[in-house]
Image (cartoon, grey):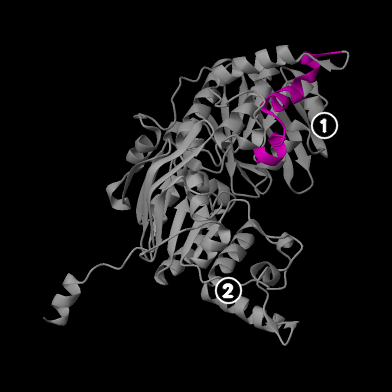
């Protein structure tokens, strides 16, 4: 037989990973039901699905954090048992979670070799560790000081350290959980370059993301989970954006951004020459009743800083804020809330919720004056009010005392929204309202925003996702360098290129 004939009939290489019939249940919840997963050398497998679909549970089983109730796992064609994270690392599996496992006050080198420090003649061999770190960084094209403290690094640099740690462990399978959630566009491009380098070295990457545009750019195969079950896994060429969304949510969504007929009233919120240092410079604009005003621009353009000034989280050097014709004196978030202005922060986990407290506690915090008498909270009344929003907003919680940390991103966002709706705020500022939220929950958030606008609320939506800004806004302001660089009034006729041109100058 000729070499050509031999290569034509040769069996394909064994998968790096096979997970077969994986089941996992928690009290009252079946998280995974007979899920299969296959990953080949040099493949990027995108795992997508709504919050609660089972993605994180499946990865925690692979990483040794959970034990499956049933099913088999094979690494490099050999069935194995992963009982704990150490077993996973020994099997060549590295999981990079959204919350990095780095110690801030330790150096890059120390974090990479933590728990397996190199020694020579009984002494730490820092030179050997440093040489190895430099070699790995050179391999993936990164310039980073091995002796820099991780707490001083950017999110993208910390992510690079996690990838370097995985490579130092000779990982053949790297799981990335929402790796671009906090990255700039330039940092995303750099990450993709690193992933392509990993592919060229026959490393398999499992890529979990809600950002479908990125999935179609970087993935070879897309695997869709819904309600703990595998809906389908096919080459990316056999999918389009609409088909992925429909598989994720289990129904047809005609329009990713629900349309409405904007009926705006008169000016309600008026900002004049608002200034703070170099971050916000003389910004003026207005928002009408029933209007969704999109605020976009590159990271660092001053969008969030502007929102914090309006909400009183930071003090303005100069400028004025008026609502319904009355100039406001806002010196703190408490003042803003009293005036009817609320802010759904970009980071709901650290700034929007007290994660270790219950949903009821979080709902009641800004509303205690309405639920208390002589310093005692009327808990029954508070729970009844919360129950109304749980039904109205379709918040999925087992009970009101559920800890906020245990909720999905979409449900956490709805709890934040519920507490502000209870106050009947007139102005609602959404800062990155759908970051880290699946497409089904996004659609619900968009629908709620439309409903609030129809009720006459002023909506300011800060978004880095241009399709979202163009799809949801009645009018768009583009920021650059702390100032308004341009305005788009005819949003249906606008393009992403037009917005970017204003953003970059």
Residue placed most toward the observer, 234 or 82:
82
Looking at the picture, tell me which residue is in the foreground, 63 or 419: 63
Q: Does the magenta run of residues contain 256?
A: no
279 in relation to 338, above or below: below
Sequence-first tag of 1 and 2: 2
Quarter-of-image position of residue 368: top right
Disc 2 designates what residue?
Answer: 137
Determine if residue 290 is in view: no
Residue at screen point 59% across, 64% down? 160
Between disc 1 and disc 2, the foreground one is 2
Secondary structure beneath label 1: loop
Residue matched to label 1: 332
Estimate the x, y position of residue 429 in percent, counting from the top left: 65, 30
Where does the magenta region start and end?
347-373
| Residue in front for this viewpoint, 62 or 166 | 62
Can residue 103 be seen from the camera position used here? yes
Mark 2 Cα-neighbour bin, 10 Å: few <14, some 14–19, many ≥20 = many
Q: Is residue 219 above or below residue 356?
A: below
> Which label was assigned to residue 413?
none
The N terminus lies in which quarter of the figure?
bottom left
| Dominant secondary structure of the residues highlighted in magenta in the image | helix
Q: Is residue 15 left or right of residue 207?
A: left
Q: Image quadrant of residue 290?
A: top right
Measured from the top left, where is residue 367 in percent x and y?
A: 75, 20
Q: Label 2 near label 1: C-beta < 8 Å?
A: no
């Amino acid at each position: 037989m000729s070499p050509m004939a031999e290569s034509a009939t040769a069996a394909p290489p064994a998968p790096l990973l096979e997970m077969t019939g994986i089941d996992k249940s928690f009290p009252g919840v079946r998280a995974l039901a007979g899920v299969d997963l296959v990953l080949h050398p040099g493949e990027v497998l995108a795992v997508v699905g709504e919050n609660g679909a089972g993605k994180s549970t499946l990865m925690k089983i692979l990483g040794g954090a959970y034990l499956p109730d049933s099913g088999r796992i094979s690494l490099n064609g050999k069935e194995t048992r992963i009982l704990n994270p150490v077993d996973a690392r020994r099997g060549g599996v590295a999981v990079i979670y959204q919350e990095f496992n780095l110690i801030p006050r330790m150096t890059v080198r120390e974090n990479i070799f933590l728990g397996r420090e190199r020694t020579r003649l009984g002494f730490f061999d820092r030179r050997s560790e440093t040489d190895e770190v430099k070699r790995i960084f050179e391999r993936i094209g990164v310039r980073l000081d091995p002796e820099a403290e991780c707490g001083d690094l950017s999110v993208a640099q910390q992510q690079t350290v996690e990838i370097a740690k995985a490579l130092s462990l000779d990982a053949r399978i790297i799981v990335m959980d929402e790796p671009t959630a906090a990255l700039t566009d330039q940092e995303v491009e750099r990450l993709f370059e690193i992933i392509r380098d990993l592919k060229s070295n026959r490393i398999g990457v499992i890529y979990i993301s809600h950002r479908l545009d990125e999935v179609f750019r970087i993935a070879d195969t897309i695997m869709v989970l819904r309600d703990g079950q595998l809906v389908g896994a096919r080459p990316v060429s056999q999918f389009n954006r609409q088909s992925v969304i429909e598989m994720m949510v289990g129904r047809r969504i005609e329009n990713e951004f629900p349309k409405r007929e904007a009926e705006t009233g008169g000016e309600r919120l008026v900002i004049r020459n608002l200034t703070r240092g170099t971050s916000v410079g003389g910004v003026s604009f207005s928002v009408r009743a029933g209007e969704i005003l999109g605020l976009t621009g590159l990271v660092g353009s001053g969008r969030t800083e502007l929102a914090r000034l309006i909400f009183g989280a930071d003090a303005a050097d100069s400028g004025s804020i008026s609502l319904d014709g009355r100039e406001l004196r806002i010196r703190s978030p408490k003042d803003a809330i009293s005036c009817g202005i609320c802010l759904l922060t970009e980071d709901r986990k650290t700034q929007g919720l007290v994660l270790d407290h219950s949903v009821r506690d979080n709902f009641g915090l800004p509303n205690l004056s309405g639920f208390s008498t002589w310093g005692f909270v009327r808990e029954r009344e508070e729970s009844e009010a919360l129950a109304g929003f749980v039904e109205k907003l379709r918040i999925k919680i087992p009970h009101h005392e559920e800890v906020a940390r245990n909720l999905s991103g979409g449900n956490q966002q709805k709890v934040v929204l519920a507490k502000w709706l209870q106050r009947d705020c007139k102005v609602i500022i959404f800062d990155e309202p759908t970051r880290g939220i699946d497409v089904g929950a996004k659609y619900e958030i968009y629908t709620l925003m439309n409903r609030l606008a129809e009720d006459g609320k002023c909506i300011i939506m800060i978004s880095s996702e241009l399709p979202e800004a163009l799809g949801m806004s009645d009018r768009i302001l583009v920021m650059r360098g702390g100032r308004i660089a341009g305005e788009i009034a005819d949003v249906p006729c606008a393009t992403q290129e037009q917005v970017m041109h204003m953003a970059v100058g």
